[in-house]
Amino acid sequence: MAFVQNVPFFSIILSMFSGIVSSVLPEKQAKWLNTAVITLVGAMSAWLLSYLLEVGGSFTFMMGHFPAPWGNEIRAGALEALMALIFSIIMLLSLLGGRKKLKDEVEITKHNIYYILTDLLLSSLLALIYTNDLFTAYVFVEINTISACGLIMIRQNGRTIEAAVRYMIMSLLGSGLLLMGICMLYDLTGHLLMSNIKESVQQIMAEGSYRVPMLITIGLITVGLSIKSALFPFHAWLPDAYGYSTVSSAAMLSSLVSKGYIFLLIKIFYRVIGIDIIRNSNILNVLFVFGLCAMIFGSVSAIWENDIRRMISFSSVAQIGYIYMGFGLGTEAGMVASVFHILMHAATKSMLFISAIGLTDVSNGSRHFAELTGSGYRNKIAGIGFTVGSLSMVGIPCFAGFVSKILFAQAAVANNAPVKIFPTVIVLAISTILNAVYFLKTVIRIYVPEDPAFEKQQGYLFFQISRQKLYGLTIICFIALNLVLGMMSQPIVHIIEIGLQNFS
Amino acid sequence: MSQYWMTVAILLPIIGGILVKVIPFPNQKIMKIYLECVMVVTSLLVFLLAWNRPEGTLEVVHFMQGLSISFRIDGMSMVFSVLIAVLWPLAMLYSFEYMEREQHQRVFFLFYSVTYGVTLGIAYASDMLSMYFFYELLTLVTVPLIMHSLSRQAIHATRKYLYYSLGGAAFALIGIVFLMVYGSQLDFVLGGVLDLAKAGEKKQVLLVVYLIACLGFGVKAAMFPMGSWLPDAGVAPTPVTALLHAVAVVKAGVFAIIRLTYYSFGTDFLRGTWVQAVVMALAMFSVVYGCTRAVMERHIKRRLAYSTISNLSYIIFSAMIMTPLGLVGALTHMVCHAVMKICSFLCAGAIMHQTGKTFIDDLNGYAKKMPVVFGCFLVSALGLMGVPGLAGFISKWNIAQAAVDSGRVQAYLGIGCLLISAFLTSIYMMSIVFRAYFPGKEFHYEELGEIRDPSWRMCVPLVLFAAGVAGLGLGSAPLVRFFTDVANGLY
Amino acid sequence: MKAGILLLNMCFPVLAGLMMLQGKREYTGKKLARRSLAAMVIAACFLVWNLTGDPLSLHLCSLGKDLPVYFHVDAIGKLFASVVTLVWILAICFAGEYMKKEQDQKRFFGFFLIVYGVLMGLCYAGNLITFYLFYEMMTLTTVPLVLHTRTREAITAGMKYLLYSLSGAYLVLFSTYMLNRYTTSLDFTPGGTLDLAAAEGHTTLILVCACLMILGFGVKAGMFPMHGWLSTAHPVAPAPASAVLSGVIVKMGVLGAIRVVYEIIGPEVIRGTWVQTVWLTLSLITVFMGSMLAYREKILKKRLAYSTVSQISYILFGLALLQPQALTGSLLHVVFHACIKSCLFLCAGAVIFCTGKTRTDQLTGIGKEMPVTIWCYTIASLALTGIPPASGFISKWYLAEGALSSGTSVFAVLGPVVLLISALLTAGYLLPVSMKGFLPGKEFDYAHLIRKEANLAMLIPVSMLSLLALLLGIFCGPLVQYVEKIVEVML
Amino acid sequence: MLLFGANFISNIGEEVAMVLFGIGFANLLFQKNLIKKIIGLNIMDSSVYLFLAEKGYIEGRLAPIVVNGIQDVNTYINPIPSGLVLTGIVVSVSVTALMLSLTVRLYRRYHTLDLDEISARLKKEGL
């Protein structure tokens, strides 16, 4: 067994222990430790990725030398490695970008708690990505939820706590359903390891028995996870949670946490139930419809918002809709598009949050459009970041958004179910318009110069790159990441395809 | 000539424009000289490229399989690029004086010349995606030009413009994606690239898609239901309205439609289908609609904008005939209308600049004070009316010939629409001319005060364009011959 | 050489007119009149030069692909040209005196000359394109004459005139587009140039085109239902202008009809079809209606204008019969009516100039005040009514004869009847003026009577025209032969 | 008929579990009062544990604890579900603790347990 194959296990354990360790560290060291760990995880995932691309295929990693079906397993393929890599990069960037804001918003004593939570979040995400065991997945889902909740309420005010409660309630509903589903699956198959479950599920299906329970199980799991990832009808908790927590949390929540659940759902589709069975059940059509609704609804409610953070949050609802719509297409291409969209949205949305905070900071912390006038000049770098993000969301060529749009459209057009072609492409176009409406409205707003006298009288402060090098650097990295996703998408898409093939 | 010159031609004005912000020019004068030089050099380069055009395609950026930005010069590119290259330096010259009273000129000039490069990009794009890329880019870089005055009204107009054109592009993208799947390639080939083996059983779907994409591009071309952004965008400074909203942007839309129809889906696939009928009907309707609104409009620039709407639909109508002759007609009107409309817009701008009057009712008797401007305006007006001997007549003649030749009854009706709109044109243009030249008995010229023609920087472009109108009207034979070659795919 | 003369005949007056327009110094009416008279005389010499000798033709240039500008001097052209020139010279003599009281004489004389040049071009035009070119120009250049006085009503009249004529022109243009496909060439050749192979199966279309053509030219000729502009536009113009408008310009509509029907489409195509019926009906309606309106009109110049409406329709009726004698009659009537009507208008002008009276009921005893003028008026009216041996009689005779011997069932009878009725009406609306003028009745007080006779500059043209009206009737031999020669060629 | 199917009696545990799950779910979803919500949550979780336990239980066998050295697999019930239940209990305890702590915080701030009222207050605060 090659040494590199320990990477998944190491990265999970590493982040978890760093969390535990930082509980006794003072705030500064905790910060450095956390940064170091995330960087390390990223580096290791990159290494793993290169290795996996080299040898191809995937491997399973036995924990504690118990063979299946008793032992607990970790499985790593190209796709998992890619996910781990991108997630850690984005987490790092969001933390760096929000660091100053964190100082202002969270009292110093809470900081190392914050970093503990981040470490836990990272570890649970990695576990969700790598694990090969359903019940482990459940446990880490819960850990994920708890740490996310902590991240929301770390900033102490009524809003955040209320948001945290709502978030908790919704996601507990979700995880309850998930748990139930898992139990029933266990009941049906008598296994907890994904690969074993899959075999027996295939058997059961081949025999044609237990159709109804199987359908119910699929339903429970899917609904549970889609509640947790804020699919359209279950998104009520999202705007507050993303809108009022401190910015790094918002960035991480919107770009990572929900994506972790979605990735788990993909894994369940492919590695637990088997994608063919899923396609034969109608669940995908349901997801398709809800996805389309989300794309429209999210954007519409974003248009009515006049608070920039909440607007971005609502746009997340729409983007999640894209992803589920991609599932709903029920083709390989659709799935690839969705996975790419997960990456793209993670990169772009966190950038939007980070740069939005930069804009509000130079407008006396107000997040309403009226006050944001001209902030693009007061904080140039954030303005550029926001513009790039918006263009990417609208789907201008060269930016990441365009690629995923193209992928979705191609998937839709190549779809063999002609019923889905036109709804998809039309809704894609419409939601593009809606995105354009609210994002570019904001862009125009921030680039309409405010008259200097008023600015002086308001006492707006101007952003100096010299005082916040880190922030500027973050934004630049984000832009670079976006461009990379936009212009060199081919290898990434290729990796995704390989990974999905390895799944099934 | 080497292919790389295409990239140079596109990048030159873009970089040159950006440098305006970077280089600390001692004074406006030097900056303007510099800009004009950039424009002229670019145009010369474009002429050279058209003169001996590089063979083959040049791939600049490669996104993924089938997605790349690449340039090639074919007949259409030559027509469009040369047209642009003729107009831009003159318009720039004009804008120098016009913008003197405006705020932050540097930004304006920056984007004004960047737009030049982007438009050339549209002209040179060798496949749908490259064109789409520059098409979107064009939308974005023209935004600062429209909201230049930063008034509430301007910002509203800008938003409308943004939403409309981005939306249109989004719908156009659907068509492009279908082409990616059902086409053998994305490069433009006269006669279409549809892979009929694949497209065969999905013909109806593809027709619907064509309709969607055509309407999508039609937004920039201000076809009937989606044209209302154009009059509002008139709040922009006149050089913008004249060059972009009479030529560059809107013609880019038409150009895209032609590319879509003749070079991607292929006329053989579309001819005689219901789609052709639908789009043609739409075009005919917006021909009449535009004129009617223009007659009702009292604001000079808005009136001209509506007239633009109707004239653009002439082009679309002619293109929708889907015969080589139709393409010839479309190209002819593309060029002729460009010259006429830019001339009339610049005249309107000169009037507004010298007198500050923006409504037609206030124009009584100015012709005596500004003979040159109104002379040019008269020429362009007559040209738009289609008086023989001027540009408009030629293009209408070609369109009508194409329509008659196609033998479709709908096309005959189209000719009718053309003539109705010509009649309405004479109403809305002549009413301005009448006011200016024959103010009425009780009118005293003293009331006007010290108004005179603007300086040479404004007059030279005007006179040149007016001469162009007449020249196109009198000696269009070689041009039309060239267009015929283009339409038959000789380039 | 002759080609040069031909061109000079058109260009010289135009250039002279332009020079006059651009001339900086304000001349008195007399000076201008002398200059323009001189110019006219020179032009007339060129004309004479042209008239002598065999028909020559000249390819000037080509507007575009297959749009040649082509001149060809044939018999009809010569006839019309000479009539125009004659009336023009006399009108200018008259104007020199009359225009004293008007403003902007420079503009008046300038455009007067330009219009002459354009009309020459119209007479010499050798194909439909060229004809249409000059037709439009004529419309545009006569507008300043119509709204010369710049009163509000004059300007509205000018606009009305412009729009009516343009709409007519566009009808013509439409069918030009169509015919260009179904004819071998658009050159005027007696018997028509219809390409029977191409026209096979498109007869209806061609007939529709013919009908539109006739209607289109009918607008200029004031044919019902498009006669509305004539009674508004002619009276508001200064007398010399209205003389030429109503004496000559309207004839150009007739010329157009002749050209199209007899030399493009060909009489054989139309004979016996619904088109002929429509044409005959319309012209007869116009004849009757025109006279009725004239009869009920009080203002003298308006009355004359209405009479023009009816008289021109005599000519159209003759053309519509498609029958040699009728055609002869029409052509004769063209000449006669030109002299008569301009004479009448000039008389009216003289009366207005000297007494300022415009309404017929004010004119009691006018004969005592300005006997010579009114005598001329009387002669002209008699001629128009068609009292032998005055000229009107000849043409009407031919018309009636043609009608009777034409195969057209109803119109063979109906036509002459209507002509007769309208002749009576003519007498009814023209003669009372002179009767009242000479025999005011006994309650008219001769005490306040002062002779206000117009001076020579006015009297000479008036009297010459009236003499012509008389003498052409008496010594009509050569003219009739000449016209019959033309007709032989055509039918 | 599914309800009163053949093995209605033998699967009584599962059915109860399902009913409880429904009750808990509904409480968690629809109760206004936070505490009741949390109770609902606990009901839901416990129902799942009941379900698992039912699955793991085999008639007439012992709990999987080795006493007096009987190593035979067939003496004991299936241990995995029990393990799962234990894990689940841990999770639910922690979650409940977290929820309760949040509730306490909210109560300190707003002196009410009604979530809607709290959000109404928040709107008033304009935060």
Image: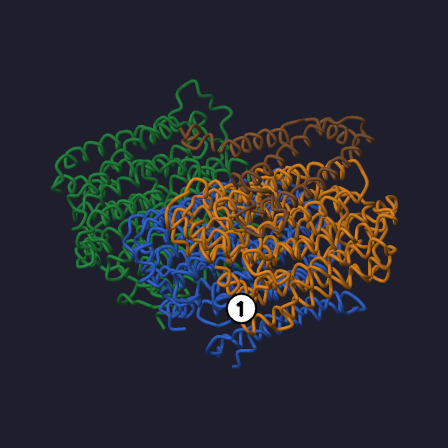
Chain colours: A orange, B blue, C green, D brown
For label 1, count other residues whose C-alpha is less than 10 Å away and answer few (under 14), some (14-19) or many (20+). Answer: many
Q: Position of residue B22 (x, y in %)?
A: 76, 68
Image quarter for residue A83?
Answer: bottom right
Q: How many marks?
A: 1
Q: Is residue A399 left or right of residue A248?
A: left
Q: Secondary structure at mark 1?
A: strand
Q: Position of residue C382 (x, y in %)?
A: 29, 36
Q: Amino acid at mark 1?
A: Ile
Q: Is residue B317 left or right of residue A57?
A: left
Q: Is residue B372 visible?
A: no
Which image quadrant: the C terminus of chain D? Answer: top right
Which image quadrant: the N terminus of chain D? Answer: top left
Image quarter for residue B156?
Answer: top right
Q: Position of residue C111 (x, y in %)?
A: 49, 52
Q: Is residue D53 visible?
A: yes
Q: Nearer the viewer, residue B429 or A258?
A: A258
Farthest residue toward the front? Answer: D68
Q: Is residue C478 above or below residue A494?
A: above
Q: Position of residue B71 (x, y in %)?
A: 51, 71
Farthest residue toward the bottom? Answer: B1
Q: Nearer the viewer, residue C291 or A193?
A: A193
Chain letter of disc 1 in the image: B
- Residue marked by disc 1: B69
Q: Nearer the viewer, residue C70 or C6?
A: C70
Q: Is residue A479 above or below residue A107?
A: below
Q: Is residue A317 left or right of residue A154?
A: left
Q: Is residue A101 left or right of residue C374?
A: right
